[in-house]
Every structure is written in C-alpha cells, then in structure tokens.
Image (cartoon, rainbow, N blue to C red):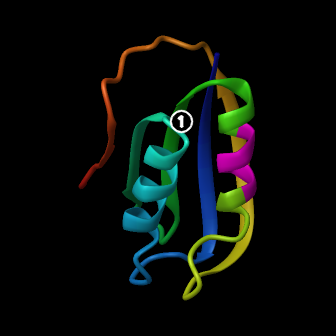
Amino acid sequence: MKRIRVYISGRVQGVFFRAATRRAAADLNLKGWVRNMDDGRVEALFEGADAAVGKMIAWCKIGPPSAKVEQVELREEHYTGGFSDFSIRHL
C-alpha cells in the first residue's frame, strides 16, 4: 500500500480537474482527497494499492481533456489508511 501527495501545475483550475480526479481515483479504488490551492495548482493525496497509485499518477500527468498539465510534483508519505473514500476538499 502506498500514500502519495501530488501537486499539479498548469491549466488545472476551472477545468473540472478535481471532479475528474475524484472519478478516476474512485475507479481505481483509491482513498484520499483533492483540492485547489491558492497559487493555481491542484493538490491531491492518494492512498491505495501500489499499482493503482501508479496509474493515478500517470493520469494526473495528463488530466481531463480541458486541462493542460505542465508539471507534477510527487511526495511519498507514510501510508496511514486513514480515509474511507476519495473527496473534494475546499480551502
């Protein structure tokens, strides 16, 4: 099991990135959350099976059709299993 925090830069706000991320994460049975940041990036925290997290990272590098991802920064963290679902968070 793996836990990864992801920061996505580019045209990622106002293009349904969070909603698409929630759907993709749910399809992969991942837990965690996604949110917009004040600096224009999207931040997400994914927990789940290693392979599923890997697929989600690959998806984040492309995003939904209306997004233009320029950079994805990854930070691996200690897996906690502390989430029951995948949600959209608001600042």
Question: Is residue 38 visible to us here?
Answer: no
Stretch of the chain drawn in magenta: 54-58
Question: Is residue 33 visible to us here?
Answer: yes
Query: Which quarter of the picture shows residue 10?
Result: bottom right
Depth order, front residue of 26/4: 26
Q: Residue 31 lies in magenta, yes or no? A: no
Residue that protrudes farthest toward the bottom in the picture = 66
Q: Determine whether 3 is above or below 60 in the image.
A: above
User: Is 39 positioned to the left or the right of 4 in the image?
Assistant: left
Residue 42 x, y percent position in the rendering: 49, 61
Residue 14 x, y percent position in the rendering: 39, 83
Residue 62 x, y percent position in the rendering: 70, 71
Q: What element carries label 1?
A: strand
Q: Residue at x 61, y 46 (%)?
A: 6
User: Is 59 positioned to the left or the right of 67 in the image?
Assistant: right
Residue 54 x, y percent position in the rendering: 75, 40
Q: Which quarter of the image is occupied by the N terminus? A: top right
Q: What residue type is labelled 1?
A: Phe
Depth order, front residue of 43/85: 85
Q: Which quarter of the image is occupied by the C terminus? A: bottom left
Q: Which residue is drawn at 73% across and 64% down?
A: 61
Q: Dot 1 surroundings within 10 Å: few (below 14), some, or many (20 or more)? A: many
Query: Which quarter of the picture shows residue 86?
Result: top left
Q: Which residue is drawn at 37% across and 55% down?
A: 35
Q: Mark 1 points at which residue?
A: 46
Q: Which residue is drawn at 24% across and 55% down?
A: 90
User: Is 5 positioned to the left or the right of 30 in the image?
Assistant: right
Residue that protrudes farthest toward the left in the picture = 90
Q: Determine whether 58 is above or below 67 in the image.
A: above
User: Is 51 positioned to the left or the right of 22 in the image?
Assistant: right
